[in-house]
Image (cartoon, grey):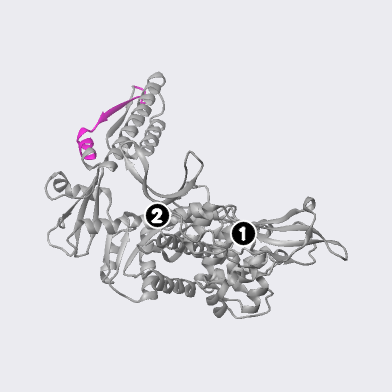
Amino acid sequence: MYLRRNRTPKGYEYWTLVKSVRTAQGPRQELVATLGKLPGLDEKVRAGWQDIQAMLDGEDPSKQLSFEESESAQQPLWKEVDVRGVRVERAREFGEVYLALALWRRLHFHTLLGQLIQTGKEEIPWETVACILTIARFCAQLSELGVAQRWYQKSALEDLLGVGWEKINEDRLYRGLDVLLENKEQLTGHLLKRYESWFGVRFEFLIYDVTSTFFEGQGGGAKAARGYSRDSRPDCKQVCIGLVVSPEGLPLAFEVFEGNRNDVTTVEDIVVVMENKYGQAQRIWVMDRGMISEENIEFLRAKKACYVVGTPKAQLKQFEQELLDRDGWQKVRPDVEVKLVGHPDGPAKEQFVLCRSAARQQKEKAMLIRQEQRLLEKLLALDRSLQRKAKDPEQASRRVGRWLGRYPAADSLFEVKILKNQEHLACGVAIACRLDRGQWANRAQGAYLLRTNCLDKDPAQVWDWYLQLQQAEAAFRTGKSDLKLRPIFHRKTQRVDAHILVCFLALAMWRVLEMWMKGKGLGSCARQLVAEVATIKSMDVVLPIRTKEATTELRLRVVSKPDRMVAELLQRLGLRLPTRSKIIANVVEKIGV
């Protein structure tokens, strides 16, 4: 579910929660709820910049002041101002970094790193540098160089963290990456404790998947290699990332593998990593068919782990009779049916679940028809070309192989033979359609097979477990689209690992925000909320004032008041903003600000 702005014909705006649903006419938005206005939105809360730390930690700023401080803060301050000379300077991005900093502090990363990292001769504490790196990634900054040269100066972090922009450079950020990587295990372990205490997350159900991310330039370190690219960039070197998430989508652990490593070879490594964190226990692992081999299945059995995995499409052929049988099917969705079937070799310690989806069947049918038509057109065009001018048979065979490889779904439905003339040159193509293979392809459309050693006899439960793989896929989409995981510009292996660690921490903050929203009735997609909060700016209002002594300028640092729609979201989250200005004395504007 996600947030959507709505406007009536008379101009009144309000929030609704909607979700995407599939219909015969295509995807549509279905209204879930309308968010009304909570009482207390218009109450004036007097909070200043000195209260920011308390507000970031979720505390009431009014309780942090003594009676004398509170009384003095409430007194008005009157000045005589030349209204024609009022101007605004030093506008900064405030809302998004303020939200990210609130997440960082409420996860207590600053406390953990302050305890783990020994204080040395550094001018800026390393936990502060780590905070800057993670917040920059949360705000989708591509590189440390861009953070140092442009972004930090344009953000309000200088005011929130008390670190001047001239002290932030790429070398300091790179060294911060090295220090952060040394504490990877402690950071992931700390996250797991926060998940358990906040959301009651248990770690008996683990979802594992692998993705890849590519490099720009010639860097990458020892793990960079060319392999199967999920980013459609086979021209670039890459690394593979194995990610473990909970059923709620919260990231638990990750490992970085070589870019040319096969997914199936990563399973044992990640299982050992999780056992080292939690000990050996009977957990349920959910993986897609790309992770599975008989060796991995035996490894999981030896670890006394349960598994729910996808199977290769070819294995579905063993259950052709059960697939055609109309009895025993259980409907789990209007367009999805499942059936529990036994092991094809007789009694065994595992079972299979047949699944078929009407929507998936229509999609696969359309894809197969399109590939058949295109492949046939290419083969007929080749036949006409050879009839006009005979060519070398090997050259013609390579062209046939090229087209068959480009349309793999239709490859098995055709038999192609190169015809030769008396001079042994290719003069045509004989095309035969295998109807028997086409019949099985039609029967298997929309069907897939799950394999499990769980003793649960409800196929709907097993199917629901497998469907949780969408959480890992959603985490990859968030990392690549919202957090700009790709591309990577680093040249050293440890910097690549540290870059992915920062992305992992930013992903954890993003997911915690979505859980926070879900608990407050704001849906489960943070993208709209982050975009709305990003409209909040901080700025300096410069007032020409006259006193008895002279005419001078008064500089006030303020946070812009969010519009009513954004204020409603912040109120539901319980996130307060500073409402009082801060007087900035004797400011000399820095070059480049």
Figure quadrant of residue 460: bottom left
Label 1: state its secondary structure.
loop
Is 27 one of the magenta-colored residues? Answer: no
| Residue 424 badge | none
Name the amino acid, label 2: Glu
- Please name the residue shown 27% across and 60% down the image: 308
Q: Quadrant of residue 98?
A: bottom right
Q: Position of residue 335 (x, y in %)?
A: 24, 44
Mark 1 against mark 2, which lies toward the viewer? 1
For residue 510, side relative to residue 101 (left or right):
left
Residue 177 lies left or right of residue 228; in this view the side is right
Name the amino acid, label 1: Phe
Q: Residue shown at 48%/53% (left/top)?
A: 527
Helix, strand or loop under label 2 = helix
Quarter location, residue 56: bottom right
User: Tag on residue 94?
Assistant: 1
- In the drawing, does residue 321 fall left or right of residue 513? left
The residue indicated by pointer 2 is 473
Segment colored magenta = 422-441
